[in-house]
Image: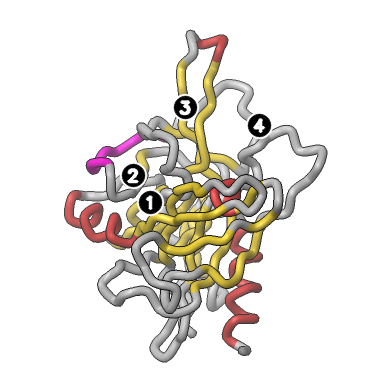
Amino acid sequence: MMIRLTLLIAAGLALVLPASGQAADRLAFMPLDPASFADSRNGVVRLLCADAATGHSYVSRAVLLDVSGAGGDHDILLAARHGVTGRAGERQCRVYGEDEETGQIIEMILAPQNPHEDNEFGEDWAILRTAGRLPADITRLQAAGSGPGMTGGLTMVNRVTDNQACRVEQIEDWSDERLIVHSCPSRPGLSGSPMVTMIKGVPHVVGLHVGQYVMLQDDGRRYGVARRLSDHFLATLIAFLETDTAR
């Protein structure tokens, strides 16, 4: 299995695997151009997840990662935790439109939940493994970790909205460095859509859209919220992939 992960930090750019001390000029998030958007949106799939406790099914999004080399028998997706779990635990999920041979989700690595956590978005992510390979014409996107303090523009990529750059919002007294607050338009069902930036001409996923904040003290203004692909998140992903290669 081939692993392609990049670490994007406010001071520069370095490769996570293999470890490298290479540095670059200071970087900011950069939204996608039309051609990159058209290709990247093809890497976003719909998840259909059935909840055993309620009998209801829920639709969310996931992004297909470029981590499986030739000969792999499955794919790896990133998704929002709240889309794939419910009161009874893990939901039965599949990639919408794919059969059970390829689209069935057979393993989940879920973000740890702190019962004292007061921010529902803070650990809202999941790593998913499919039963088989998804079609080769679905784009596999590379992932990048981003530290706090990044500015600039991002693109929230999915199949149902047009290419629209959105800003990283700076909110006074904001303290949760796990999250990116953004101006991208959203609606229910788009949780798990990737936040994508250009790095050296290549689209990279740097976060997952997970919901909205409504600022009551600011006339009800709505902000999008994305879970950043932080160091902790990437460490969990890398550990999973390293275990995966040993199978």
Under circle 4, the secondary element is: loop
Marks 2/1: CA–CA distance: 5 Å
Marks 2/4: CA–CA distance: 23 Å
The image position of residue 85, as x and y in percent, is 62, 52
Q: Is residue 206 above or below residue 66?
A: above
Residue to which mark 3 is pinned: 223
Residue to which mark 1 is pinned: 196
Q: Amino acid at mark 2?
A: Thr
The image position of residue 175, as x and y in percent, is 66, 31
Q: Which residues are magenta?
A: 161-168
Q: Is residue 222 above or below residue 27?
A: above
N-terminal of the two: label 2 or label 4? 2
> Is label 2 in contact with label 1 (beta carbons under 8 Å)?
yes
Q: Residues within 10 Å of mark 3 (few under 14, many from 20)?
A: many
- For the residue pair 152 and 238, the one nearer the viewer reads as 238
N-terminal of the two: label 2 or label 1? 2
- For the residue pair 32 and 201, the one nearer the viewer reads as 32
Residue to which mark 2 is pinned: 155
Q: Residues within 10 Å of mark 1 (few under 14, many from 20)?
A: many
Residue to which mark 4 is pinned: 175
Q: Amino acid at mark 1?
A: Val
Under circle 1, the secondary element is: strand
Q: Residue at x 34, y 35 (%)?
A: 166
Magenta highlight on residue 241: no
Q: Write down the quadrant of residue 143 in the picture.
A: bottom left
Q: Residues within 10 Å of mark 4 (few under 14, many from 20)?
A: few
